[in-house]
Image: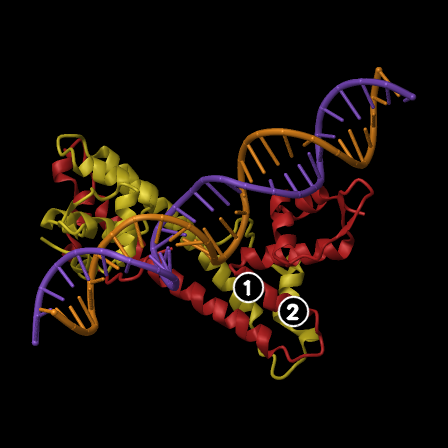
Chain colours: A red, B yellow, C orange, D purple
Amino acid sequence: MLTIGTLSRKTGTKVQTVRYYEQIGLLREPGRTEGGQRRYEEADLDRLAFIRHARQLGFSLDAIRELLELSDHPQQSCADADSIARRQLKQVEQRLLRLQALQKELKRMIVECSGGQVADCRVLEVLRDHSECLTAHDDIGS
Amino acid sequence: MLTIGTLSRKTGTKVQTVRYYEQIGLLREPGRTEGGQRRYEEADLDRLAFIRHARQLGFSLDAIRELLELSDHPQQSCADADSIARRQLKQVEQRLLRLQALQKELKRMIVECSGGQVADCRVLEVLRDHSECLTAHDDIGS
DNA sequence: CTTGAAGCTCTAGCAGCTGAAGCTTGTAAA
DNA sequence: TTTACAAGCTTCAGCTGCTAGAGCTTCAAG
């Protein structure tokens, strides 16, 4: 019999977020006290921990839904879970490439301006003139 | 006299997005034809290009607002622009670290499951058991 | 003069939460 | 047993940065 607050504390999830997960169907509707407060079981804690862990690894809620679906049916082939993880890895690697490009660009922008005026500011200059850009960055970095 | 479509094409911004930038005050309200269609000048194109470029470098719209504010007042010291860029770089570097950790973790998760069943799936196992995690990842990776 | 692309406004929706208002319940100490 | 107050509840709105769609009007070329 765990309160929502306990779940929240044990998993580092905000109380509202727990309720939100219930609302979107990631967590089941738990039992209630007579007064209407939620009371959870250990299994709910595990499930929430699973969700949070997956979120920390960057999985979307939809991907997590799939993963939970899979782990609820242990007979199936695990190829699906594997492919979800691979998809995820691919995304992460793409983001890494983009961020590395941005890092390079930003470092290049930041030169000592030691009291100079905005008119001569390298930072603004680089932003103003895309052609100065070393890196082809055509997508919005997230 | 540029149409919104021209601006859109030249900067790779969706038409809706241009109107959105106007709505939130990043772009000025342009002149209109008698029929009510927007007509822009070259300066608007430059400003939009600046905005898009900054977005591509990962600056938030708020940061961009500040940068535009600065570049509109060329007398000022450029220390502010520099510090915005540095802040941005710091953020990028933090994200990089996180993503690198995630990449490591995901790679570790993905082992050949060669037709195995979900019950033995490493991917799900790792997600289920946080303690298997090599990396301390306590924040949500975006 | 007609056609069709491109423009317009307005509204709603996406992910993934988060905060606040205003109320009720649970629990532990006095 | 009463009372105080933390923690729960629901509902709604808002965040970022767009994007899509409905349903209409305007512009420009042929």
Quadrant of res A53: bottom right
Identify the amino acid type marked 2.
Answer: Glu
Identify the amino acid type marked 1.
Answer: Asp
Q: What secondary structure is marked by label 2?
A: helix
Q: Residue B28 got which mark?
A: none
Q: CA distance from mark 2 to mark 1?
A: 11 Å
Q: What residue is rendered at 61% in x and 68% in y?
A: A67
Q: Position of residue B93 (x, y in %)?
A: 38, 50
Quadrant of res C4: bottom left
Q: Residue furthest bottom?
A: B115
Q: Are marks 2 and 1 in contact (CB under 8 Å)?
A: no
Q: Residue A69 got which mark?
A: 2
Q: Position of residue A73 (x, y in %)?
A: 70, 73
Crowding near the residue tagged with mark 1, few <14, some 14–19, many ≥20 C-alpha atoms within 10 Å: few
Q: Is residue B142 visible?
A: no
Q: Is residue A59 above or below residue B110?
A: above
Quadrant of res B120: bottom right
Q: What residue is rendered at 29% in x and 39% in y?
A: B84
Reading the image, the residue beneath label 1 is A62
Q: What residue is rendered at 19% in x and 43% in y?
A: A124
What is the chain identity of the residue bearing mark 1? A
Q: Position of residue D21 (x, y in %)?
A: 39, 64
Viewer-nearest residue: A26 or A86:
A26
What is the chain identity of the residue bearing mark 2? A
Viewer-nearest residue: B75 or B102:
B75
Q: Earlier in the sequence, mark 2 or mark 1?
A: 1
Left or right of B39, for residue B107: right
